[in-house]
Every structure is written in C-alpha cells, then in structure tokens.
C-alpha cells in the first residue's frame, strides 16, 4: 500500500506541476456543461410562422391571432399569395406556413368547418414535425371553442418530467459525456506521456509490480473524475435546476463502475498509441464518438437497426445515461438499476483485464 500511495502521489504532483492542465481539469467540464446544457435541447418555441390570408375577414384575422398569441409561434411575414409562402419556406424564413382560403369566414358563419392549409418545412424534420403538431393543436382548440364536441376527450398525464423540458432529459446525459471524455482522455495521455519523455523505463526498473503501476495511474484520475462530477452536479442542480429525485449516494455509487470502464478504456488507448496526438485521435474518433451515437444520448436506441442495437450492449455510456436519467428524473435506486450497474461492472473488469494484458505485453 505504501508503494501504491507513492505512485499516486507522484501522479498528483505531476498534475500540479503542469500549469496548463489544471484549468482544463476543473474549468473545462463546467464550461462544457454550461454550453452543452443550453445547446443540447429539443424544446422548440417561437416557431417561425408565415401567413397568407386570402379571406381577410374577422374570422380569418381571429384565426391568425390565435396563432400569434400563443408562445409556440412567431409571425415573421404575411404575404398575399401562395408563391410568397413557398419563397419564405425555401429561404428558411418560415418553418410553418398557413393559407386561409377565400370564403373561410362565410363558411364558418354557416356553422360549417373551414378548410385551412398548413405547410411545414421538412428539411428541419424536428422543428417541422413539432410545429405542425402545435398548429394542429391550435386548430383543434378553435374547433372545440366553437361548440363542436370532440369524439374523444383526451387527458394526457406525463410522469417524471411533467413539463416535458428537454433540459431535464439532456443535461444529465451531457454530464455523463463530459465525465467520460475527461477520465478517458486524461488516463490515456498520462501513460503515453510517460513513454514519450522516457520515464516509463525508469518506472520499470523499480520494484513496482504491474498492478501497482496500473492502480497508481488510475487512482489519481478517479479522484479527479470524482471532483469533476461533484463540481458539475452543482451546476446541474443549482444553475439548470434539474431535479434530483433519487439518492445522491446511489448516484455516486453507480458512478464508480462507469469510471472503471472509462479509466480502463483510457489505459487501453495508451497501449494502442505511441504519441499523445495518437491517443487524442483514438479517444475522440474510435472510442468517444461511437459511444455518444450508440448510447441513446442523441438517437433513440429502439429506432436503430438491429445490428446497432446489439452493439449498444458493449457501450458503457448507454448504461450510465440510463442510470443518470433514472436517478435524476424517476428517483429509482438499485432495485431498478442493478442490471445497468452489473453490466458496467462486468464491462469495466473486462476492459481493465484487456488493458493490463496489452500493457504487460508492450512493456515486456
């Protein structure tokens, strides 16, 4: 234990002597979380709206007012013909376009439903789909207000995120991504740096055993990762106001097997790299990006082809994203999340074993 602590202390002192890396360790995660926390959102408000009112009656003006008075739309232009709407959609100045035909007011005065054309810009699929849903909701409200009873009364109930704020859904996942990047890259860079400057050979002639060298490299960055997690949690809880419905201790406990995976991957990357530049490239393009794409952080796993769905079972980030969202939003604990914890533990042990074998072969 005394020898292991000496290696850990050496790594911490080496971090302290590098004035450039300290701001990266503790400021970069907070800055990334702030930027991505605002940027990574699927909430869509104030959709750009263009209107072509060919009726120009009180009924048509009332219809336009219903759209513009809501928080979902922002009127960007009113045109006199359909070609004008097409130009606005093509230029990206409008995402939703509404055409009110001539005779709309007279039709409504007779008690008959009036036809309204709604066009959506499909080049931005998400905004177009959501904006179209908003438009249909406004039109449905107008129909209900006119005295026409709907055939089915819908009473939706949303659990775990009642306001459907995408920030509550995305920010915990951003936290997992930042923790993965920092611990994986720092570990890989630390081991490769020893090889570049020639100090790895000096360590090999010491009485250090292989497991002491590996633990001595991993423990300091596990400590750094824990500090980064605690710092980022303060931002998540008190700046973004994401509710933590579950146990804080359970969250910390289930973070340990995830860091076991990321630290192990960092060690594995160091065995595949000769230089720090190679380590950074491998981390970013081979180990980091596939995990982000296959974790469910951006794209739903159930919508992926079957072969990629199977591949996600080898992605540690998939399980940790589920853990974070479960603890934060659902308030669940080990009774629900034990499969994810067990999968992370198994992956972590497998990754560390493979990394140790490759490191011993390389050093030998």
Image (cartoon, rainbow, N blue to C red):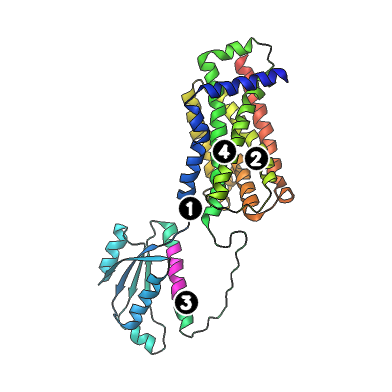
Which quarter of the picture shows residue 129? bottom left
Query: Please, what is the dominant secondary structure of the magenta stretch?
Result: helix
Please indicate whether residue 32 sits to the left or right of residue 89 in the image: right
| Contact? badges 4 and 2 (CB < 8 Å) | yes
Q: Is residue 90 left or right of residue 273?
A: left
Q: Which residue is mark 2?
A: 255
Q: Nearer the viewer, residue 102 or 244?
A: 244
The residue beneath circle 4 is: 179
Q: Quadrant of the N terminus?
A: top right
Q: Secondary structure at mark 1?
A: loop
- The mark nearer the N terminus, 4 or 1, is 1
Front of the two marks 4 and 3: 4
Q: Quadrant of residue 13?
A: top right
Task: Estimate how packed mark 2 is, as few (under 14), some (14 to 19) or many (20 or more) residues with alpha carbons within 10 Å.
Answer: many
Q: Residue most toward the bottom?
A: 110
| Among the two numbered marks 4 and 3 on one chain, the one whose residue lies closer to the N terminus | 3
- How many marks do you count on the picture? 4
Q: Nearer the N terminus, badge 1 or badge 2?
A: 1
The residue shown at (49%, 28%) is 21
What residue would you read off at disc 1?
A: 41
CA separation, marks 1 and 2? 24 Å
Asked which secondary structure carries label 2, the reply is helix
Tag 2 or tag 3, which sits nearer the N-term? 3
Which sits earlier in the primary sequence, circle 4 or circle 2? 4
* Residue 141 circle label: 3
Residue bounds of the magenta highlight: 130-139
What is the CA distance from the residue labelled 4 to the residue labelled 2? 10 Å
Depth check, front residue: 27 or 313: 27
Are discs 4 and 1 less than 8 Å apart at CB? no
């Amino acid at each position: 234990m005394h020898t292991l602590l000496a290696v850990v202390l050496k790594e911490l002192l080496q971090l302290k002597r590098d004035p450039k890396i300290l701001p990266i360790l503790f400021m970069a995660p907070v800055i990334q979380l702030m930027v991505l926390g605002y940027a990574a959102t699927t909430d869509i408000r104030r959709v750009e709206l263009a209107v072509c009112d060919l009726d120009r009656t009180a009924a048509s003006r009332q219809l336009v007012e219903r759209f513009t008075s809501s928080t979902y739309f922002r009127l960007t232009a009113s045109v006199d013909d359909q070609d004008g709407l097409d130009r606005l959609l093509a230029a990206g100045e409008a995402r939703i376009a509404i055409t009110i035909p001539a005779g709309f007011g007279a039709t409504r005065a007779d008690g008959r439903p009036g036809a309204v054309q709604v066009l959506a810009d499909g080049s931005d699929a998400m905004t177009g789909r959501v904006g179209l849903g908003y438009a249909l909701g406004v039109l449905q409200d107008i129909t209900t207000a006119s005295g026409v009873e709907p055939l089915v009364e819908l009473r939706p109930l949303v659990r775990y995120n009642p306001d459907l704020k995408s920030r509550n859904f995305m920010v915990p996942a951003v936290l997992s991504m930042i923790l993965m990047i920092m611990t994986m890259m720092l570990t890989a860079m630390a081991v490769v740096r020893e090889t570049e400057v020639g100090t790895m050979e000096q360590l090999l002639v010491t009485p250090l055993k292989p497991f002491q060298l590996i633990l001595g490299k991993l423990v300091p960055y596990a400590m750094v990762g824990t500090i980064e997690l605690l710092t980022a949690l303060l931002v998540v809880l008190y700046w973004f106001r994401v509710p933590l419905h579950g146990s804080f201790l359970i969250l910390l406990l289930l973070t340990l097997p995830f860091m076991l995976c990321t630290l192990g991957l960092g060690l594995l990357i160091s065995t595949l790299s000769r230089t720090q530049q190679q380590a950074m490239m491998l981390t970013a393009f081979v180990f980091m990006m596939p995990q982000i794409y296959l974790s469910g952080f951006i794209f739903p796993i159930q919508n992926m082809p079957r072969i990629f769905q199977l591949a996600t079972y080898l992605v540690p980030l998939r399980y940790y994203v589920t853990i974070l969202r479960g603890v934060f939003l659902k308030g669940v604990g080990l009774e629900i999340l034990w499969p994810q914890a067990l999968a992370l533990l198994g992956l972590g042990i497998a990754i560390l074993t493979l990394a140790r074998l490759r490191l011993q072969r390389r050093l030998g």
